[in-house]
Amino acid sequence: SSDNLATTTSSAQASSGNLLQDQLLGTNTNSNVATPVPTAPVSRAGTPPPGERMTYFTDADKTAGGAHDANVPFTAHTRSFIYGMQPRAVQGMLDFDFICKREVPSVAAMIYPFGGAHVQKFYWGTKETLLPVYTTLEEACAKFPEVDTIVNFASCRSVYQSTVDILKHSNQIKTVSIIAEGVPERRARQILWEAQEKNVLVIGPATVGGIKPGCFKIGNTGGMMDNIVSSKLYRSGSVAYVSKSGGMSNELNNIISRTTDGVYEGVAIGGDRYPGSTFIDHLLRYEQDPNCKMLVLLGEVGGVEEYKVCEAIKNGTIRKPVIAWCIGTCAKMFATEVQFGHAGALAQSDLETADAKNKALRAAGVVVPDTFEKLPLVLSQTFQSLVKKGTIQLKPEPETPKIPIDYSWAQELGLVRKPASFVSTICDDRGQELLYAGMRISDVFKEDIGIGGVLSLLWFKRRLPDYACKFIEMVLMLTADHGPAVSGAHNTIVTARAGKDLVSSLCAGLLTIGDRFGGALDGAAEQFSSAYDKSLTPREFVSVMRKQNKLILGIGHKIKSRTNPDLRVEIIKDYAKKHFPSTPVLDYALQVENITTSKKDNLILNVDGAIGILFVDLLRNSGAFTREEAEEYIKIGTLNGLFVLGRSIGFIGHYLDQKRLKQGLYRHPWDDISYLTPGNELGRTVASLDSINKKA
């Protein structure tokens, strides 16, 4: 079916359980060993439904691309493997394929021995597509028998062995590009010898690769997409070049596009002393290609490969017009030998100087400009002469393709704008140093602001007075735990003993926090501050709450009483009286406590109420907040946040305690449960149908 990503050879094959992986990588009978199913080359599927984000490629004609031609290694049907995890290079190749209107991506798969078989997502234009990643070349070759090119991104340490492994598949792989720099010369010579034995074209080492406009691009050749479009590399021209330098190949792309009908093919052979292929290898290919009309050679100081080109021109092997220039003529201006950037860019004799090679090329009949600056002029003159002779037929310029660009790039260029998904005003991690509400993390420690200071920055976005920070820390210490019997700690313990992890156990305890347990801070703050602001007397406040059948939050304790006070409340009351500017709401609450305890001794101001009320006094009277800000912090749950933060310390302690004690699964004892059967519930007795019939 054209809707499938790949075909399988047998319905009996076992599925991995992942449909997408099965479709792209093939199914197998052994889950530990990948056994890919060979498939034909792929082509674009039919028109996707509206709104479809993905582009899929399906099985196509097995003869696509035809037999391999050594003189034309790259065509619009060439497909490749990328050796190494190089998503940026792959995306660049796919973007090039898209603007060239290729039917299928030039990259069939990636080979990465370390990550396991999986799939990677890439863009195809503005949509997305999936490329498989294999751990071995054998798997990839079996899955994609049409692939004949590999771009090897292995490092200089491992590139020799990986290339030797690639050359073992010379019956399928005919072109290898080696990107790595610093390959030992001995290893480079070994690769060169073995590649020649197996008739495999090697480009590199130390190369950016090559490009065939409208057809195929190796790795990062050509630079960014805007450079590729400005150099018109999305369609074929008539001029083929070979260069040592990858950077200068970009310059040639630009010069050739401005002075001729564009590049037909370009290769950078690399700057090492022993490249896998040389100037003459590629120029001879260009000579045999009828679509190539002009040849350009950009050599450099060092080596003698340019003299082989001179011989080929003299003996008539190369007949097409050749324009050449050897870089490094400035070397004569130095008193000593100069090593230029490439490993091979060093003249070890007079023959290897740029001037000597330019002179020899000129003598052989090559068009050599007087300086590099005049290269565009001689290119234009030679091209125009071929046009006049009819050797080159000018073609209409196609429409400039639209460049698919990433959103981040477009935003950097100022082409798009987008509202932020989040707004954050408390922390900034974008710079060299983390900022808490504008305060550098190093200053947090230099000034020793403590946990209370950090909380004031992240919760309130400002530095609070030292006494306020100390009060916050006191609250966290006071609320850290209240024994294993309270509902939150109980839930945490039960969950921990059920074998759950720390986060699950902590959440089980935190979910019990509410108006009945621990969550009265906000409610107490709201009730007492509202009554105080309305100028209700304490007795009027108590009467109103009674008439409304509402509990006064923050009042009452199961154990503590007026005669057995809660020392936690006494500690923070004494601290507030000593350090706060004023405590009007606390004073009001203590008057309410006098009324409630006169009715029942345990209706005291509890720790939740004391914390909530004192925080109202702190927010209103510290001078750090406006009245509106103080009210907002109360409404949005800030005070309950203090209890949650503090009590989390205790819950985690209970979890660790149970794990340390290796306590088993908890089961509540029967004798602590009142079982009420349906017949005895609420003292009622349900008569059976049989007894009713007997009485009748």
Image (cartoon, rainbow, N blue to C red):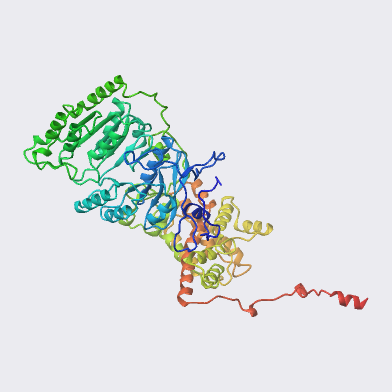
Quadrant placement of the C terminus: bottom right
Provide residue 300's location: percent of width, then percent of height. Answer: 18, 37
Residue at the spot 58% in from the left edge and 61% down from the top edge? 514
Provide residue 509's location: percent of width, then percent of height. Answer: 54, 66
* Residue 689 seen anywhere in this rendered image of the structure: yes
Residue at the spot 18% in from the left edge and 37% down from the top edge? 306
Q: Is residue 88 left or right of residue 528?
A: left
The foreground one among 61 and 608 is 61
- Relative vertical location of residue 477 with respect to residue 658 in this rendering, above or below: above
The foreground one among 11 and 624 is 11
Q: Is residue 183 left or right of residue 487?
A: left
* Residue 570 seen anywhere in this rendered image of the structure: no
The foreground one among 21 and 140 is 140
- Relative vertical location of residue 195 with respect to residue 279 in this rendering, above or below: below
Q: Residue furthest top?
A: 388
- Relative vertical location of residue 519 with respect to residue 310 in this rendering, above or below: below
Provide residue 238's location: percent of width, then percent of height. Answer: 32, 29
Q: Is residue 454 left or right of residue 667?
A: left
Q: Residue furthest left?
A: 335
Provide residue 532's location: percent of width, then percent of height. Answer: 57, 53
- Relative vertical location of residue 230 with respect to residue 35 in this rendering, above or below: above
Q: Quadrant of residue 560?
A: bottom right
The foreground one among 571 and 456 is 456
Residue at the spot 18% in from the left edge and 27% down from the top edge? 369
Q: Residue furthest bottom?
A: 671
Q: Quadrant of residue 327?
A: top left
Q: Is residue 590 left or right of residue 406?
A: right
